[in-house]
Image (cartoon, grey):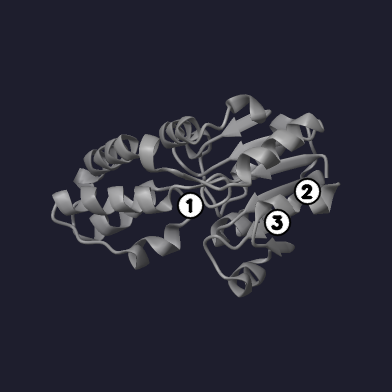
Amino acid sequence: MQHIIFDMDGVLINSEPLIMHAAQTALAEYGITATRKDFEPFLGAGEEKFIISPAAQAGKSEDIPAICERMYRLYEERAAKELIVYPSALPLLRQLKEREILTALASSSARRKLMVSLEAAGIAQDLFRVILSGSDVKEKKPSPEIYLTAAQKLGAHPQDCLVIEDALSGITAAKAAGMQCFAVTTSFEKKQLKQAGADIIADDIIRLLDLIF
């Protein structure tokens, strides 16, 4: 595979504890209670959905924009100091760049969160040929749109792309795009990843090097 497309959260970084806490806090400020279980169906599909569903169920749809804004502000306040970067992320990305493997970043996160996360993680944008966020597409994962768009911008056929994912919605998106999918066990168990359609499953993304070299 000469074209590799990375998801971000759960693959390169672990922002889920921070963004979930920010979402819970923002919702609570509007009198809405939410738990991790409420968020799990939306993992990998864009953090705005952490707000949209609970707020709608509470009859506060009109407050969704304000709650989302509060969530992002809370996340930004903590990301610089508390964001978790997986140890293999930077070594892997640097090796791929050195070996001239074309890579893309395709995250369902809003561009605002994506850029804050990359900066906090110390991941240089030039490690990727293409960077796409949930703000750049009409339909988020499990729609294949973001992966098909990434392939197009890389100048690659979908069947020549390998997607690196951790979330069930992302695996579904990759397979719907006609791509192979390498899944890591950071967010879901191997059985769940396999059932979702992952072609290869590993505990660490560094295992990708064994696959392509």
74 sits to left or right of 177: left
Q: Amino acid at mark 3?
A: Phe
Q: Residue at point 57% right, 45% down?
A: 12
Q: CA distance from mark 1 to mark 3?
A: 18 Å
Viewer can see residue 179? no
Residue hosting label 2: 209
Q: Is residue 124 above or below residue 79?
A: above
Q: Residue at point 42% right, 43% down?
A: 83
Residue hosting label 3: 182
State the SS at label 1.
loop
Residue hosting label 1: 45
- Label 1 neighbour load within 10 Å: few <14, some 14-19, many 20+: many
Q: Nearer the viewer, mark 1 or mark 3?
A: 3
State the SS at label 2.
helix
Q: Nearer the viewer, residue 27 or 62?
A: 27
Q: Residue at point 74% right, 62% down?
A: 200
